């Protein structure tokens, strides 16, 4: 198993290949790779990201099968089911790196910014989880336009999710405190295809 820093470097190098149209991750999707993975998996990174169809982690990081453990949910939020999935990869598979990946023009964040009053239904549950990030953005950018608030709320949401991972999971906190799991936040830009790192723990 590689270190967390090496894992992060692999992800970012893969993103650079994606941006430069020099992808090679598909080479690790062949029959020998699939057969080797029948014996088990040892992904070097966990990525919690949005369900948005424009943000497929395996593609934007140019990774093959068995390399990253992906958890996807609208708004890249952390509920108990998501936390359990992350705990499994971090504790049982020994994955050293955890990335929370937001993205520009996120529909869930945009909806949360534009919501008036209580959000309804199951989608409302997602928006309610994002509301604290929206409140931070609105207080920080009073008088600014909606686009600026959405951008700031996206960053705040990633930061709050990173904090929630350790606040709501004793397993993740223990692994992070012991130096066995590095947690980083990042944002993917839909326009240029680049991933920007902006937090680590």
Image: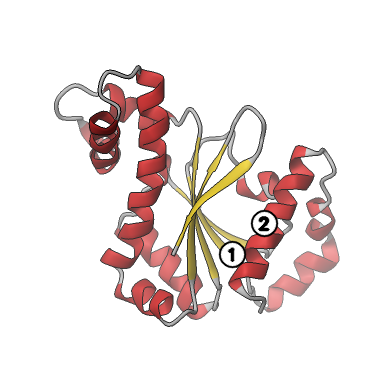
Which badge, 2 or 1, is on the more N-terminal residue?
2
Report which quarter residue 177 is drawn in: bottom left
Report which quarter residue 112 is drawn in: top left
Q: Position of residue 201 (x, y in %)?
A: 44, 65
Mark 2: give few (<14), some (14-19) or many (20+) Cα within 10 Å. Answer: many
Q: Separation of disc 2 and disc 1 at Cα? A: 8 Å
**Would residue 113 be visible to someone looking at this image?**
yes
Circles 2, 1 touching at the beta carbon (< 8 Å): yes
Q: Is residue 54 left or right of residue 198?
A: right
Q: Is residue 84 left or right of residue 103?
A: left
- The residue labelled by disc 2 is 11
In the image shown, does 176 or 59 lie closer to the viewer? 176
Please report the residue visible at 65 percent of the width from the left and 66 percent of the height from the top.
7
Question: Could you tell me which secondary element the residue under label 2 belongs to?
Answer: helix
Q: How many marks?
A: 2
- The residue labelled by disc 1 is 45
Q: Is residue 13 above or below residue 74?
A: below
């Amino acid at each position: 198993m590689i270190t967390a820093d090496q894992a992060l470097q692999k992800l970012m190098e893969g993103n650079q290949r994606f941006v430069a149209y020099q992808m090679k991750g598909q080479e690790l999707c062949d029959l020998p790779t699939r057969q080797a993975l029948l014996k088990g998996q040892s992904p070097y990174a966990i990525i919690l990201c949005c369900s948005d169809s424009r943000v497929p982690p395996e593609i934007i990081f140019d990774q093959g099968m068995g390399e990253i453990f992906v958890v996807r949910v609208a708004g890249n939020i952390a509920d108990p089911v998501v936390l359990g999935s992350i705990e499994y990869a971090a504790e049982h598979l020994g994955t050293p790196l955890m990335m929370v990946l937001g993205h520009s023009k996120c529909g869930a964040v945009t909806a949360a910014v534009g919501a008036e009053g209580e959000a309804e239904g199951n989608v409302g549950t997602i928006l309610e989880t994002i509301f604290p990030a929206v409140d931070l953005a609105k207080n920080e950018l009073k008088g600014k336009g909606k686009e600026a608030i959405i951008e700031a709320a996206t960053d705040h949401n990633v930061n709050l999710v990173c904090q929630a991972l350790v606040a709501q999971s004793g397993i993740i906190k223990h692994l992070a405190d012991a130096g066995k799991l590095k947690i980083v936040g990042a944002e993917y830009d839909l326009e240029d295809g680049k991933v920007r790192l902006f937090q680590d723990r």
